């Protein structure tokens, strides 16, 4: 089984792009890492619905007049790290189907701010044939693909994290700050990554003498960029592979947005995707995609994920969810966030109880700039496509290690999770 970064899509058959999990017996070691202090301020808050008080996960928080941003976790919480030089700026909070909200950073005043968003319901424009024909919306998206994205290569700074939980308890955490060299969307050249900083923490006692490794590292999130990797989804066979239906018309970042449902065609039997596409009504650019892998045939689906496993264990995929976000700046759209959620059940032979592992992978772009060809890095300095981040990362670090680079908090604070694991290791 090839890694997510190595899979080629055959246009005559709908092959899939996934993360590859490697299940190995215990072999690893923990090392220490030095600290680096940076000059920044932390801002914390919670984003909720103004009426229901329900917390809003994956809301985007952006620092105005900069490319600094982060997203809320599953509890609606966020941690934003901003250079002191930008402390006089405001942030803008955006969420699907809600009006934007702008707040000065000075309003935080050292407290955890509760931010209420108001739902923004839109009526579908009466016009056009396009709004009644989901296939036409998809065709317009594909036609405008190159026009809607930067013609220049981009250098992106990103925060990347992998976490493995045995049921609800963290067993392994890996974090990295990476530079992404993003090729123009009109180009068929592949994006590549430079690893800047990394750290990990693993409590092997929680892994039942089994080590789960994710092959592909940051490339796992880059390769679900379905607009850049057109053979992954938006290829010439798309209308054979999928059936599209119109869902609703909503506001995303104060812009009218078509929501289109998709599911694999009935005559397609290998596992494919189903979910929702959010398409900007003005530019017909993809602003967001939330989708899952169909796992009705778990035996067949497991072949896409599992590279190695102990002979006495069956590895069964239970969940495979994906999410991609794009943002617009200078009238162009760029990849801003990717997330993969996997869940596996390990069914051990001759054991009464099985084990369930949840694997979360996410990467958020925290800054970017246009670059020239002369600035590109030599291939020997690039992160390998089949990298296993755990093998590249080592040790612990205080929060200062990450400096001004923004972080995404998991269900609980990642620092608290690392401290719990550290106590076990000691």
Image (cartoon, rainbow, N blue to C red):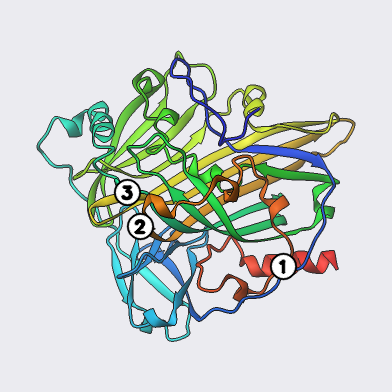
Q: Could you tell me how far apart the alpha carbons at marks 3 and 2 are, in whole angstroms?
A: 28 Å
Instruction: Say whether residue 168 is visible.
Output: no
Which-is-in-front pick, marks 3 and 1?
3
Among numbered discs 1 and 2, the one appearing first in the sequence: 2
Residue at screen point 41% across, 59% down: 59
Name the mark nearer the viewer: 1 or 2.
Answer: 1
Circle 2 is placed at which residue position? Answer: 95
Q: Is 223 displayed left or right of 161 in the figure? A: left
Q: CA distance from mark 3 to mark 1?
A: 37 Å
Q: Where does residue 341 sit, x and y in percent of width and height?
A: 57, 45
Question: Residue at label 3?
Answer: 152
Judging depth in this view, the residue of 227 and 378 nearest the camera is 378
Q: CA distance from mark 1 to mark 2?
A: 34 Å
CB under 8 Å between discs 1 and 2: no
Q: Residues within 10 Å of mark 1 (few under 14, many from 20)?
A: many
Where residue 175 appears, as percent x and y from the top left, is: 62, 59
Question: Which residue appears farthest toward the left when viewing the image?
Answer: 127
């Amino acid at each position: 089984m090839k890694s997510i970064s190595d899979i080629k899509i055959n246009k005559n058959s709908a092959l899939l792009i996934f993360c590859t999990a490697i299940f190995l017996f215990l072999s690893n070691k923990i090392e220490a890492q030095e600290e680096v202090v940076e000059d920044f301020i932390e801002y914390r808050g919670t984003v909720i619905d103004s009426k229901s008080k329900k917390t809003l996960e994956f809301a985007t928080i952006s620092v105005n007049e900069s490319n600094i941003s982060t997203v809320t976790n599953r509890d609606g919480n966020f941690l934003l790290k901003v250079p002191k030089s930008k402390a006089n700026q405001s942030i803008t909070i955006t969420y699907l189907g809600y009006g934007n909200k702008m707040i000065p950073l000075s309003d935080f005043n050292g407290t955890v701010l509760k931010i209420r968003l108001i739902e923004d319901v839109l009526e579908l424009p009466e016009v056009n044939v396009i709004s009644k024909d989901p296939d036409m919306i998809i065709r317009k998206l594909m036609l405008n693909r190159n026009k809607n994205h930067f013609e220049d290569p981009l250098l992106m700074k990103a925060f990347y994290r992998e976490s493995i939980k045995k049921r609800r308890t963290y067993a392994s955490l890996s974090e990295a700050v990476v530079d992404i060299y993003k090729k123009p969307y009109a180009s068929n050249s592949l994006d590549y990554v430079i690893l800047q900083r990394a750290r990990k923490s693993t409590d092997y006692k929680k892994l039942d003498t089994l080590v789960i490794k994710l092959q592909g590292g940051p490339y796992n999130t880059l390769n679900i960029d379905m607009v850049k990797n057109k053979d992954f989804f938006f290829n010439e066979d798309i209308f054979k592979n999928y059936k599209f239906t119109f869902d609703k018309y909503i506001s995303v970042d104060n812009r009218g947005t078509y929501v289109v449902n998709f599911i694999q065609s009935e005559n397609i039997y290998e596992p494919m995707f189903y979910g929702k596409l959010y398409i900007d009504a003005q530019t017909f650019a993809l602003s967001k995609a939330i989708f899952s892998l169909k796992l009705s045939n778990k035996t067949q689906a497991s072949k896409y994920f599992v590279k190695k496993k102990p002979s006495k264990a069956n590895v069964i995929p239970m969940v495979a969810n994906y999410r991609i976000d794009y943002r617009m700046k200078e009238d162009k759209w760029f990849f801003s966030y990717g997330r993969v959620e996997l869940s596996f059940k390990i069914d051990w032979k001759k054991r009464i109880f099985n084990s369930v592992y949840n694997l979360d992978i996410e990467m958020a772009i925290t800054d970017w700039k246009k670059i020239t060809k002369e600035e590109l890095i030599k291939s020997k300095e690039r992160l390998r496509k089949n990298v296993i981040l755990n093998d590249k990362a080592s040790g612990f670090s205080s929060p200062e290690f990450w400096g001004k680079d923004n972080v995404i908090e998991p269900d609980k604070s990642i620092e608290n999770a690392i401290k719990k694991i550290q106590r076990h290791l000691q």
